[in-house]
Amino acid sequence: WVAMVLIMMYFVTSADSASLVMGSLTSRGALHPRRWLVITWGVLMAAVAAALLLAGGLDSLQSATILVA
């Protein structure tokens, strides 16, 4: 169970960093973007991941990850 907690912390930290970077990019490079903008990006990322999982399961999520990378 320790490994699962560590993996979960890794994904949460990565998602937080990604939403902060996207918020910074959409606010013209501001080092401290508005909180609502960062939250919006986080919710959008979660919604896309949930939609892909519901639509086609893990295979569609993995395919989308490979296409975007």
Image (cartoon, rainbow, N blue to C red):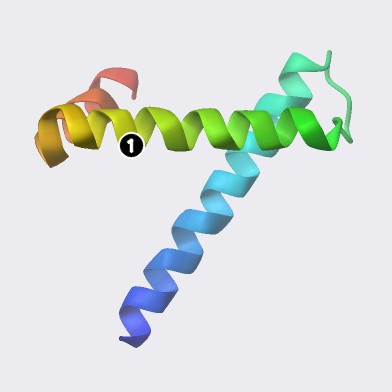
* Residue 68 relative to residue 9: left or right: left
Where's residue 27, x and y in %? 82, 17
Q: Is residue 58 left or right of residue 32?
A: left
- Label 1 belongs to which residue? 50
In the picture, which quadrant includes the C terminus?
A: top left
Q: Nearer the viewer, residue 54 or 15?
A: 54
Residue 13: image quadrant is bottom right
Residue at 84%, 13% (x, y): give it: 28
Q: How many marks?
A: 1
Give, as a three-letter code, the residue at label 1.
Ala
| Residue at the (66%, 26%) spot, across then down | 22
Task: Label 1, secondary structure: give it.
Answer: helix
Please provide percent x and percent y for residue 30: 88, 25
- State the residue in front, 44 or 30: 44
**57 with respect to 7 (left or right):** left
Q: Position of residue 32 (x, y in %)?
A: 89, 36
Q: Could you classify mark 1 by the number of other residues whose Cα lies within 10 Å: few (under 14), some (14-19), or many (20 or more)?
A: few
Residue 36 screen position, x and y as percent? 78, 32
Where's the N terminus, which quadrant? bottom left
Q: At 74% from the left edge and 15% from the top edge, which residue is drawn?
A: 26
Instruction: Name the residue: 42% across, 66% down.
Output: 8
Residue placed farthest to the bottom in the image?
2
Q: Tell which of 31 and 23 is nearer to you.
A: 23
Q: Which quadrant holds residue 42?
A: top right
